Each structure stands twice: as C-alpha cells, then as structure tokens.
Image (cartoon, rainbow, N blue to C red):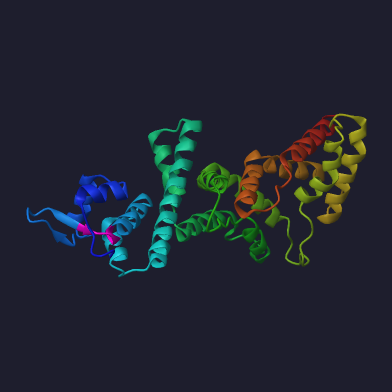
Amino acid sequence: MDGGILYSIGELAQRSGLTVKTIRFYSDRGIVEPAGRTHAGYRLYAQDTVARLALVRTLRELGLGLAMIRQVVDQELSLSEVAAQHAAALEAQISILRLRRVVLTAAATREPTPEEMELIHQLATLSEAERRRLIDDFLNSVFDGLHRSSYYAAARRSMTPELPDSPTDEQIRAWVELAELSLDPDFRASVRRLAEDHAAALPDDAPTPPRPDVIAIVRDLVGPAVARGISPDSPLADPVVAALTAHCALAHGRSDDAELRRWLLRRLQAASDPRRDQYLRLLALINDWPTPERLTPVIDWAVAALRMRAAR
C-alpha cells in the first residue's frame, strides 16, 4: 500500500475523477471504506481505493445496481458472473424495448383507435404458447371437420408461423399483422370457404398425393400469360383459357363444358382475396422463407377471361 500512504477524500476525488459527494455516497454505503481517520475525524483512504472506485464507476456506467457492485468489489461475485447476469438482463430489456418500438411504429403509421392500440400491444407481447394457441384456433376454424381432413395436415404446417427466438423488428411487425388478420372473422370465413371448396372436390378415392387444385393449375397456366401482359379479352388468351378448362376437367374428372366453366368461375371468385396473398407474404417473412408469388393477379385474370367468354 505504498508505505501506508493514505488519501483524504479530496485527494481521492482528484485521483479518481469522481466528486467528493459521490465518494462519500459510496463510502456511506460500504462500497469503499476508509482505512483510517484524522485526529479531527475526517476519513482517509488507502491507495488501492482509487482502483476500486475506477471499477465501481465502470460498473455503474454499465448500469449495475449498488447491491451487485458491492458483491463484485467484495469479490463475492466474479466479473464474468456479473457480466453474464447483466447481459441477460439487458437482452430482456432490449426485447421489451423492441416490442414497444414495434407497437409505437404501428400506431404512428395506422392511427389506431385506443382499442386497436391495445390489441396491437397484446399481440406483440404474446408468449410462444399464446401465439401457438392463437394460430391453432385460426387453423382449426379453417380445416376442422373437412372431408378427407388427413390431406390438410401439410396445409396446416405450411400456414403456421414460427417466430424465431430473436426476431427482427420486421418479423415482429409481420407477426402482429398476421395475427390481426387471423382474428378477422371475414378472413377466416373466406379461407374456410376455399378449404371447403377444395374438400368438396375430393372424392373418397382421391389419390395420394392429391390431384392438383384449380388454384395451382391457374398459377401454372395463367401465370405466363399475365407475365407476358396478355389481356384476358385478347384472342391470345383463348388458348390459355382452353388449356385451363381442359386441365381442370381432367384433374377433377369432369366434362369440359359450360357447367365446368361455371363451377371453375365460382371457385376462382371465392379464391380472389388479396388478404390470402398478404397472409402468405407475412408468413414467409416470419418463417424466413422465400417471398411467395402473388396469386391474386392470375386468379383475377382467369375470372375476367372466363366471364368474358361466358358472355359471348
């Protein structure tokens, strides 16, 4: 201890860079203790108190509380233990702050009512188990009780969001929006109608894997026409529509006639819901999947093309 050199609180303040008031505060709480006193009763501190105060200042700047700092300087806890504990606490705080930022960002862009603001906050802060219950409830409303329901296990999996343990802000925003969408009764009814239409088209002896749905057929046949900019009322659309009805008739064991076209038109009109594309886009973002192609443009093209030819 350098020959027993002792510092007054003023000298210690000069050497440590802290104020006399701060050092007295730490001394009163036992974080640094005087090594002696003058005849007049003033505190005196050993030279190693300078290093002790430097550590205290660093830990305070990192946000540690006085109780934990006392354990460190008294060597009841190692610095590595404290660092691990504090890092975990900071991670939790960061997660909370990120969720708050997501909620406030949503509020800033949407001008929600107080009720909507509360809903956004609740959805952003759901636990993993609560998130799964919400999505299970949505998927149950879509698929439960359907004919040949065993076919829909894969469909359920493909529509299930899995928010990662450390989601990005964009993934959290996507989750909130997807959750809101899944709670929309009209959207639930729309997706349920699609599932019912698909199930109704499956006979009891449907093959495994099941034959392609009309939406998949439309995507494959109409997509290139939409990409080429062919108008649904153009003569160039005639062979596309002919191929579409022929493929649907073959896939579903029906005659390629006016009744098939009316049935196909009803199926496609029910499927023409841009919210479905939005759900799949949000799902891909949450699950870190490739962005899916939008199906609404090709479905709308097919609906327009079938209507125009039915009217001729």
Q: Residue furthest left?
A: 40
Is 42 left, or right, of 128 in this rendering? left
Is 27 left, or right, of 104 in this rendering? left
Is 77 left, or right, of 172 in this rendering? left
Is 216 left, or right, of 175 in this rendering? right
Relative to the observer, which residue lies in front, 162 or 119? Answer: 162
Going 30% across and 50% down the picture, which residue do you hit?
15
Residue 281 picture location, percent across and down: 65, 46
Relative to the observer, which residue lies in front, 21 or 119? Answer: 21
Write down the quadrant of residue 205 in the picture. bottom right
Write down the quadrant of residue 55 in the picture. bottom left
In magenta segment, residue 307: no
* Location of the N terminus (image quadrant): bottom left
- Residue 262 vertical placement versus 197 (above, below): above
Relative to the observer, which residue lies in front, 173 or 281? Answer: 173
Relative to the observer, which residue lies in front, 142 or 120? Answer: 120
Residue 73 picture location, percent across and down: 30, 64
- Residue 288 vertical placement versus 242 (above, below): below
Residue 212 picture location, percent across and down: 79, 56
Residue 92 picture location, percent across and down: 42, 55
* Location of the C terminus (image quadrant): top right
Q: Point out the stretch of residues depicted in magenta.
A: 45-49
Going 83% across and 53% down the picture, which residue do you hit?
254
Q: How many marks are shown on the rendered structure? A: 0
Is residue 135 something one can see in this rendering? yes
Is residue 253 something one can see in this rendering? no
Q: Residue furthest bottom?
A: 76
- Residue 47 vertical placement versus 116 (above, below): below
